[in-house]
Image (spheres, rainbow, N blue to C red):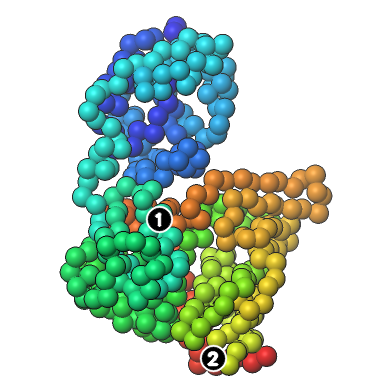
Amino acid sequence: MVKVITYGTYDLLHYGHIRLLERAKKLGDYLIVGVTADDFDKTRGKINVQQSLMERIEAVRATGLADEIIVEEYEGQKIDDIRRYDIDIFTVGSDWKGKFDYLNEYCKVVYLDRTEGVSSSDIRSEQRKIRLGIIGDSPVAAKYVRESQFVNGIEVTSICTSSPKLFGDTHLVTDDYKQMLNEVDAVYVVSPPKQHYQDIKTALEYKKHILCESPITVSKSECTELFSLAKKNGCILIDAIKTAYATAFARLILLAKEGKIGDIYSVDAVCTSLRPMTEDSWNSICGWGPTAMLPIFDILGTEYRSKNISSLIDKNGNDQFTKVDFSYDHAVASLKVGKGVKSEGELIISGTKGYIYVPAPWWKTDYFEIRYEDSTQNKRYFYQLDGEGIRYELVAFVKAINSKKDLSNIRQSVSETVCEVVEDFYGRKEMMLL
């Protein structure tokens, strides 16, 4: 029996895919199809995959051409698979010609001509692009303009700002927010936090989708109101904390919840940076607080029993440094955030069997460790991270808009509780000034 193996992403399965699988099938008696995992696709720069791994596997299975389907998860797996399954022929499209010649040492390599004029990339790019407007003067906005260029299906078409120099020489800048809303499909809000409520509400009244730099508002009730308005108007409202979309962060949260370090009794997160602040800029609790609260609320939940806030406030009313301690029924947590104080920006999750250690800067991590009392059992995890997670966040935003489903990695309850903590900070509730 002649065994054949081929690999692909098979996103938005089309005639070209099917034609290639048909020809691969004819090369032998038994066809194994490797479907690439989401994480592996990211390491190869494919972040615009529209369908989940299971959807893509089911699409390949539905063709009836694959005798066996496997998942490709790591670099070098092709050699392992060829040996494991005793493969006679490896085949792939001719656009990869020469790339896999090294496999001739293990089996015969055949490059098949691809069907001209059709590809998943073309299908994705032909879909009408979402016109994204940006409102705000934060340097973070410039990152979103840059990262949007890596994401199919979205294009920045307008920027409402009073600081055009942040964006270089561009014709996209305007100072008329309502005019911009008439010309876009969605808005990334990165205006000062106290302005978020009005900016988001106005955009939702124009029935525009919203991606908002966290916190969504400085009031829990206003946050809840905006989510309700978004649902009523058929709009997507997503909290923009880019860390939530980093693969490493998502994996460490899952491992923690799966009990890899036992019962969790403590979560400690530190986020600091030395940046000059003006009176209307993002202070520590707004600039870093939502990121630091994310692992706490993801792991321990939002139903904390009590909290204590300690802050160092400057003459302009900005907090240079803030520490928040949370108490739960069976755990504690703390966060330290600062723009006027520098500390080691690490994340530590402590359990009864071991702990998860994420080195600085943990909010942009591509690596973390699980450590045990017996250090020989320690394990390290590495994952690809491109664009600080921003491009993955934009991909999720595009998918949510196109599918009309909330695909945010941040639960509404987390967004609301972040706003609650910020509200208590401004209301000086449960707070001590240093």
Q: The residue under label 1 is which amino acid type?
A: Arg
Q: Residue at x 54, y 45 (%)?
A: 384
Work out which quarter of the rendered image holds the N terminus and state it.
top left
Residue highlighted by disc 1: 146
* Front residue of this view, candidates 171 and 381: 171
Position above or below: 306 against 292: below
Q: Residue at x 34, y 61 (%)?
A: 169
| SS class, disc 2 | loop
**Gap in Å between the C-alphas at discs 2 and 1?**
32 Å
Q: Residue furthest front?
A: 169
Residue highlighted by disc 2: 316
Q: Is residue 403 left or right of residue 408?
A: left
Camera sees residue 333? no
Q: The residue under label 2 is which amino acid type?
A: Asn
Q: Is residue 168 left or right of residue 77?
A: left
Tell me where residue 199 appears, x and y as whole percent: 31, 78
Position above or below: 256 against 47: below
Work out which quarter of the rendered image holds the C terminus and state it.
bottom right
Instruction: Please give the label number shown on residue 245.
Output: none
Tell me where residue 257 appears, x and y as whole percent: 58, 58
